[in-house]
Structures are given as C-alpha cells and as structure tokens.
Amino acid sequence: DVGCKTEGFTHQFAALSTGEIVTAPAEYKRQMKRLRRAQRRLARKQKGSASRMKQKRRVAQLHERISAVRRDFLHKLTHRLTCENQALAVEDLNVRGMMAAPKPKPDPDNPGAFLPNGASRKRGLNRSLA
C-alpha cells in the first residue's frame, strides 16, 4: 500500500507514504526554461512577420515536447508504482476547503452570541496539514 501527495507539477512532484519524494524530471525543467526564453523572443517579434511565424512554430514545438516529457514521466511513474505495490488509492481532497476558517454558528436563543463551532480543533488540523 502506498499513499501519494501531489503539489501540482512543481519541482517536488509527489511525496509517497514510504518517505520517497518524486521530483519532476530534469528534462522537464530544461524544456520549461527553453519555453520561457522562446516566449519572450516571440513577444518581441512584429506581428504578421515571417520571423514571428517561425518563432510561433518553435513555441508550439516546445509545448508538444513538454507534453511528451510529462506524459512519459507519468507513464513510467505509474507503471513503477503499480509493479511495486499491491494496492493504490487515489483521493481528491479539497485542502483549501479543509483549511478554511469555520463559519460561526449563531445561538438561536441568545441573539448576538455564538455557539461553539470547533474552531480550536480545526486550527490544530490546519497546523497538521500545512
């Protein structure tokens, strides 16, 4: 059994319950750097020019390359995880909602006063999530 915590496709892609931290491939980071540079070059080209069309094509090719790198990385990672483990569980948690402040509960008998809403318990949970 393995659990996986993801933070989007950043430098730290996933943290497994085994303690292993899976990072994004170096090729992904390299291609993202090239894409940023190519997009800056594209922004400087004059609209309608032939050089802008060529640069636009280069940017599109970089997007395709990044997509292929991500797809390959995800395929290899999921294949490895399924081969190494008997069971995998996927859970989509609304972490932002879990960390939100609890809404106050108005006291129906005493206007202007509020009932306990578990804010202190939730504060402890938020500390453990962060």
Image: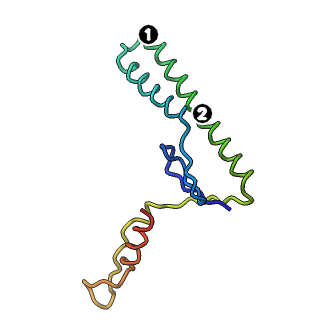
Mark 2 to mark 1 CA distance (whole Å): 27 Å
Q: Of 67 and 2, which appears nearest the observer?
A: 2
Q: Which mark is residue 51?
A: 1
Of the residues under marks 2 and 1, which one precedes in the sequence? 1
Tell me where residue 93 appears, x and y as whole percent: 53, 61
Q: Residue furthest bottom?
A: 109
**Residue 80 in picture, x, y percent from top left:** 70, 47
> Relative to residue 129, is residue 60 depicted above or below?
above
Residue lying at the far front of the rendered structure: 19
Q: Nearer the viewer, mark 2 or mark 1?
A: 2
Name the secondary structure under disc 1: helix
Alpha-carbon neighbours of circle 2 within 10 Å: few (<14), some, or many (≥20)? some
Residue 56's place in the image compared with 64, above or below, is: above
* Residue 7 as seen in the image, left or right of residue 90: left
- Please name whichever residue, 105 or 119, is drawn nearer the observer in this view of the structure: 119
Dot 1, crowdedness within 10 Å: few (<14), some or many (≥20)?
few
Q: Which mark is residue 89?
A: none
Residue at 56% from the left image edge and 48% from the top image edge? 22
Q: Quadrant of the C terminus?
A: bottom left
Q: Amino acid at mark 1?
A: Ser
Secondary element at tag 2: helix
Say which residue label 2 marks: 69
Residue type, label 2 = Val
What residue appears at the point 59 percent right and 60 percent down from the top-left corner? 17
Question: If the image is split into quadrants, where does the N terminus sit?
Answer: bottom right
Q: Name the residue rendered at 48%, 31% in the picture.
A: 32
Which quarter of the figure has residue 114? bottom left
Q: What count of labels does the image hold?
A: 2
| Residue plotted at (47% across, 61% down) | 95
Image x and y of residue 2, in percent: 65, 60
Callouts 2 and 1 close, C-beta under 8 Å = no
